[in-house]
Image (cartoon, rainbow, N blue to C red):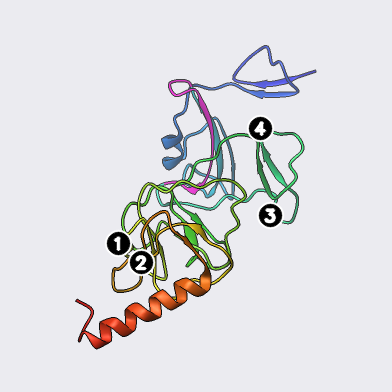
């Protein structure tokens, strides 16, 4: 038969029935279910409950009255799935995922902060970026500078093959007319020419 705690008609092999517990109850050690190291209300362990006001279930690893502690899932191996029964990676989310900042696990100097609107960076990436579709930038884009002054602000000589129709500014703030077609060699010569002209004129102003 089934075993019930807090109820006389359990629907599963083991069912615990209790009052609603908000997640903050874990701070005091109160919960519907707990696995602890030692006895007492403040014993370290894992506590679980359900909050009927917020309609959420919760799990918290903590030392009540002291600190909240890390919670490990599949600490040895195995994938974890959210909204999927067949996770294909360490964390497989079938749907949307939210985070304030995404950090590289091995080097937190590399990150993505989608909401950042101030310098130095919204993203700091250590490798190349491959974009297979179109990209939209509402502000200026800088190559070789963290303070772009133009829609596309390049500091240095642009290399490659035919670049297409674009305007390129050098470190002195000059730009080629929009709509002209440029080749990498032409751009390099234009930048060098601007640099020489500026030097002959006695400065960058």
Q: Is residue 193 left or right of residue 126?
A: left
Name the chief secondary structure element in magenta. strand
In the rendered view, would you say 14 is above or below 147? Answer: above
Q: Which residue is mark 1?
A: 149
Q: Which residue is mark 2?
A: 169
Callouts 3 and 2 close, C-beta under 8 Å: no
Q: Is residue 95 left or right of residue 120?
A: right
Q: Quadrant of the N terminus?
A: top right
Q: CA distance from mark 3 to mark 1?
A: 48 Å
Tag of residue 83: 4
Q: Quadrant of residue 87?
A: top right
Circle 3 SS class? loop
Callouts 3 and 1 close, C-beta under 8 Å: no
Residue beneath the point at 29% across and 82% down:
197
Q: CA distance from mark 4 to mark 2?
A: 48 Å
Q: Is residue 162 left or right of residue 65?
A: right
Q: Mark 2 packing: few (<14 Cα in 10 Å), some, or many (20+)?
A: many
Q: Earlier in the sequence, mark 3 or mark 2?
A: 3
Q: Earlier in the sequence, mark 4 or mark 2?
A: 4
């Amino acid at each position: 038969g089934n075993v019930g705690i807090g109820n006389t008609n359990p629907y599963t092999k083991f069912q615990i029935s209790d009052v609603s517990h908000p997640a903050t109850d874990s701070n005091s050690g109160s919960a519907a279910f707990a696995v602890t190291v030692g006895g007492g209300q403040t014993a370290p362990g894992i506590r679980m409950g359900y909050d009927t006001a917020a309609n959420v279930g919760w799990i918290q690893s903590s030392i009540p009255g002291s600190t909240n502690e890390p919670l490990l899932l599949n600490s040895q191996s195995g994938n974890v799935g959210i909204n999927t029964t067949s996770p294909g990676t360490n964390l497989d989310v079938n749907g949307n995922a939210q985070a304030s900042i995404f950090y590289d696990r091995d080097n937190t100097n590399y990150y993505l902060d989608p909401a950042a609107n101030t310098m130095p960076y919204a993203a700091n990436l250590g490798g190349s970026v491959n974009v297979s579709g179109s990209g939209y930038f509402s502000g200026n884009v800088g190559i070789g500078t963290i303070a772009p002054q133009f829609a596309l602000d390049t500091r240095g000589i642009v290399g490659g093959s035919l670049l297409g129709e674009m305007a390129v500014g050098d470190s002195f703030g000059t730009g080629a007319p929009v709509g002209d077609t440029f080749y990498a060699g032409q751009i390099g010569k234009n930048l060098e020419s601007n640099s020489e002209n500026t030097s002959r004129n006695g400065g960058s102003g």
